[in-house]
Amino acid sequence: MKGTKRKHKRLSNETVGYLYVLPAVVFIVAFVVYPIAYNILISMQKYDISTFQNGVREFIGLTNYKAIFSDQLFIKSVSNTFVFTIVCIIFQLGLGFLLALFFHKKFPGANVTSGLTLIAWVMPMLVIGIIWKWLWASDSGAINYFLSALHLIKEPIPWLSDPKYAIIAVTATNIWVGIPFNMLLVITGMTTISDDVYEAATIDGASKFQSLRFITLPLLKPTMVSAVTIGFIYTFKAYDLIVGMTQGGPNHATEMISTLIYQENFTTFDFGKGSAMANIYFLIIFVVAIFYSKLVMKEEA
Amino acid sequence: MKKRSLWKRISACGLVAAMCVSLLAGCGGSSDTKKEAKKTKDGKTELVMWTFMSKENSYGKAFYDAVDAFSDGSEEYTVKIEQIPFSQLVSKITVAAQSKSLPDIIQVDGCDHASFSAMGIFADLTEKVDSEMSDLEFYSGPLESCKYEDKLYGLPLNANNLVLVYNVDMLKAAGLENPPSTWDELKEYAKTLTTDGTYGFAINAIDDEGSTYSFMPFLYETGADWNTLDKGAAKALGLYQDLAADGSMSKEAFGWGQNDAYGQFVAKRAAMYIDGNWRLPELEKDADFEYAFAPIPAYEGTSATCIGGENLAIVNNDNFEGSWDCVKSLFTEETMNDYCKKSGMIPTVKTFAMADEYFTDDPVMKVFVENMEVAKTRGPSPIWPQISQVLRDMIQQVGTGVSADDAAADGIKAMQEYVDKQ
Amino acid sequence: MSKYQTKQVKKYGCTVIAVLFTLVYLFPLYWMVITSFKTKEEIFSAVPTFWPSHFSFDAYITQFTVHDGISMFSYLKNSMIIAVGATLISTVLATFAAYGLARYAMKRKQMLILILTVTQMLPMVMFLAPMLQTFNKLGITGSYASVILFDALFSIPMSIIILRPYFTSVPKELEEAAIVDGCNRFNCFYKVILPNAYPGIFACASFAFMAAWGDLMASMTFLTDGDKLPMTVMMYKSMGRYGVNWNSLMATATMVIIPIIVLFLIMRKSLVSGLTSGSVKG
């Protein structure tokens, strides 16, 4: 192969780049074009129980979209999802980073213990939801038990039955799930920074905090960008956790876009509306992806 | 130069080809005719049935055995049962319906039935039932749940209804001989029975269908129904509110499903709760105290209760004849009574129930069987899910401190949209 | 104390803190496991018990018996097949794509990134019906391939996003030196770049594996044969129509994650050796 390549003109760098990316792109495009087109199409049709089998799906343009934007519950679920996602990312990455600083140090068991925390991420989401539901239970849950044993609270807090606490409980649980992943991402990212750089800095008289600020953080920027992007995408879709813990309650306090989409598709059977909601979701993640791609492009410059 | 543009063209072609494949694959599917029925080795046509029953327990096994007996006895057909976890059943049916990959027979929950019938995926059984099952008298409630626009789109397989379940030992210890029979008594009892670590009363009030189910009897007792909420929703909600407010019911109840409420009772953390006859086998196994059943406490008139259960529906496809034969074979006195005895369910065919003294004389079952005469069905309506959501929203509001009257007012307003659709 | 001793104390001190932290952090896991040994009343008792008063192995014994004609090992095997298949496809495709994105300037790069992440832009649920139609047309519904392809599609974006920084952090000089030494661009990729990106590749392969292992939606929708169902479905069978078998559910969940933990501990060794085998230094 080497010989033949040398004989012909070398492929341009750009073409080689395309070739590396091609397999994944073809794979994705082959399977994804139809679902996306299908979703866009039915979001503009009246596709629900009444029009199901007859095949006459009236084209109603943007009616579904108008309907969901005037639906208070949808608006609420969008804001819930954003708040939930942003708070989760901040704490998951923030705490994960701090923990990474600790676990990155070389001490016996550092690798094993930090790796074991990943179990939090591996446990099936549904089970996590159920377990934490028990932990947050106001009467018999372990959390209130510990809080009152430590005399931090006088009365059990109604974590899951009070709207203002429910969203906190659900967010805290999701943060617990996400910290190990972020921590590990940062740790492995840190390993790519060679020790020489730190040595040079200490010789130059930099304090630990300064090396953190001027060496670690900047060099970790690509990793952090990945972590935030993945964090956003994965947290935004939160479904199993919510269903396991609160079913979107109490009184829709923890209703998310994904739970609403599921409900629209499989309880109300209004597929047109469900797809319209899904397309709004699509636009949001699309914007995130654009930001990510812009950041990637900036890195290259 | 040439090489570069050649590669570019190849990749571009590859992409376009991929897109075409994708679109073709999708679009072709919608005009595709239904799948060919599989033939097994001995030339029999294979029918597929979806159920959430598991062979693991005695009644599931009884059901599977009955279906196998049909397969063995039939020369043309054999039935393959696929077990789908209950929580996935509706979504699986929906996705399969959209993709035209439905099986031949499906077990559905009664309140979902009308929606699917309205979608047109089930076959109309009215004529077949009239001609071939005329000697069977079904209980009207369960049969209603299979109807849509006055036609029958399935047959009810089993029935259940709700009662008050109470811990006899706890009541005795508090000096209470008989169970409460009115709302006032219920509230009194609940208060008395609430001690350290135990609540007097528990109910499932989380945002799911089971909670609507448990709420309906109280609603019915005020003389209201989903389309006449103004007659009594506020009072029924008021009951929940009062019980939670004076501490005899945990506020957590608004986050409990049916199984959670059951768990509370069996762990002796609730003295009374609302449940149905499906729970009989489990109660026998789990409870280490004496328990009993009573009609749901009445408001001002008589006790009311609500019906639940599952139905069998036949999918609208070419295998109708075989599917009908199979379904019909399950509606025999022997099969149905056997299955129901093992599962705690009530036969949906009154003729069968009356013929067996287990259903007529057993002190426990008697209560449930007699309830069948007065129990009401939810809906039936293809928009029952939306109706149910309005009811649950009211309940959830009360759970978060909104007054019963306000919650009821909101509910009435929201329900108007659906009442008008009738 | 000598300097050496202080260092030792510091090191082991850190170990103690790490172990304590992990134990506290994994308390929910502990709760899951002990619940699988408890009886139903204990699960709902007023005061949470932190150690089962009656140890009951029932939940586990039933896992090992044959359910509905399907043994637990069948579920395990299927989970393995699906997870390994999805991981292979997504990791291979993602590795190439991430490298391309990391190292080569392309005019349409932004668009490519958007295409590569597109499967994450819609909730998985929206893909079910159209993909079932596609798979029906292709005739692969009910086969492992359908679930493997579906899972791979969703792992690729994440794998690419994770991998890219690893490729960008490999110093350019290494590549240039290799090219000067005579290997063409593809060879240089295999022999020089990949070894340096092992940690990243293992990381994203592990995540892809875990994602596929935990998948339920795809298996429920595309598989019809009981023999092909993975362990996650086994978990849902504990959640019956009229009752949840809590201890059974927790037992199943425990069994679902044990293989992952084992795999992870094994992979962790290679990860560490990958990190320390003189990779980063020039």
Image (spheres, rainbow, N blue to C red):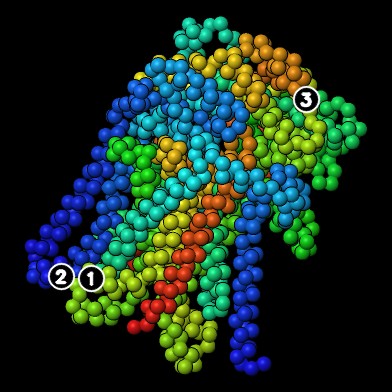
Residue B299 lies in what quarter of the image? top right
The reply to whether the C-beta atoms of the residues labelled 1 and 2 are less than 8 Å apart is yes
Give the Cα separation between the discs numbered 1 and 2: 9 Å
Which label is found at residue C187? Answer: 1
For the residues beneath circles 3 and 1, the answer to whether they share a chain is: no
Residue C252 percent across, percent down from the top left: 57, 47
Q: Nearer the viewer, residue C13 or A98?
A: C13
- Residue highlighted by disc 3: B294
Chain bearing tag 1 is C
Q: Are marks 3 and 2 in contact (CB under 8 Å)?
A: no
Q: In the depicted view, which residue is nearer to us: C13 or A145?
A: C13
Element type where label 1 sits in the image: helix
Label 2: which residue?
A: A2
How far across and how far down the image is residue A62, in percent? 38, 39
Q: Nearer the viewer, mark 3 or mark 2?
A: 2
Residue type (three-letter) at the residue carrying disc 2? Lys
**Crowd rating for badge 2 (residues with CA inside 10 Å; few <14, some 14–19, many 20+):** few
Q: Residue at x 20, y 80 (%)?
A: C181
Chain letter of the residue beneath label 3 in the structure image:
B
